[in-house]
């Protein structure tokens, strides 16, 4: 089994919504302030997911002082710092 398949299996699974749930549940109307909060939560979850995949896909080369190049979805200073300090991997990314 390859690294990508292992990472997919280890990724958190989200429950699927049934079509009946979608019909019965209406989205509540949100004021602009709560939309910002929702976007913040979505961005935080996205960052956690990106960090998870970076960590899992680089697991075979942890603590080898190698360099990994990634695209902008995986690029963030906190992820880069954590990978360098905790796992001994230097990273380069686009922004």
Image (cartoon, rainbow, N blue to C red):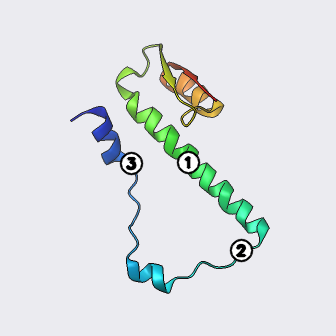
Distance of label 3 from label 2 (alpha carbons): 30 Å
For marks 1 and 3, the one nearer the N-term is 3
Q: Name the residue located 41 percent from the left edge and 27 percent from the top edge.
A: 58
Residue 82 position in % (x across, y down): 57, 29
Q: Name the residue located 61 percent from the left edge and 50 percent from the top edge.
A: 44
Distance of label 1 from label 3 (alpha carbons): 13 Å
For marks 2 and 1, the one nearer the N-term is 2
Name the residue carrying label 2. Answer: 30
Look at the numbered disc 1 and give the secondary structure of its residue: helix
Q: Name the residue located 39 percent from the left edge and 78 percent from the top edge.
A: 19
Question: Of tags 2 and 1, which is closer to the observer?
Answer: 2
Residue 76 position in % (x across, y down): 62, 33
Label 1 near label 2: C-beta < 8 Å?
no
Name the residue carrying label 3. Answer: 11
Q: Is residue 79 left or right of residue 10?
A: right
Name the residue carrying label 1. Answer: 46
């Amino acid at each position: 089994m390859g690294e990508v398949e292992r990472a997919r299996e280890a990724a958190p699974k989200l429950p699927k919504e049934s079509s009946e749930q979608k019909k019965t549940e209406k989205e509540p109307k949100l004021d602009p302030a709560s939309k910002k909060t929702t976007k913040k939560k979505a961005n935080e979850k996205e960052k956690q997911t990106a960090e998870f995949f970076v960590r899992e896909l680089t697991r075979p080369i942890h603590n080898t002082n190698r360099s990994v190049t990634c695209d902008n979805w995986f690029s963030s200073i906190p992820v880069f710092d954590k990978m360098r300090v905790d796992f001994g991997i230097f990273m380069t990314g686009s922004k």
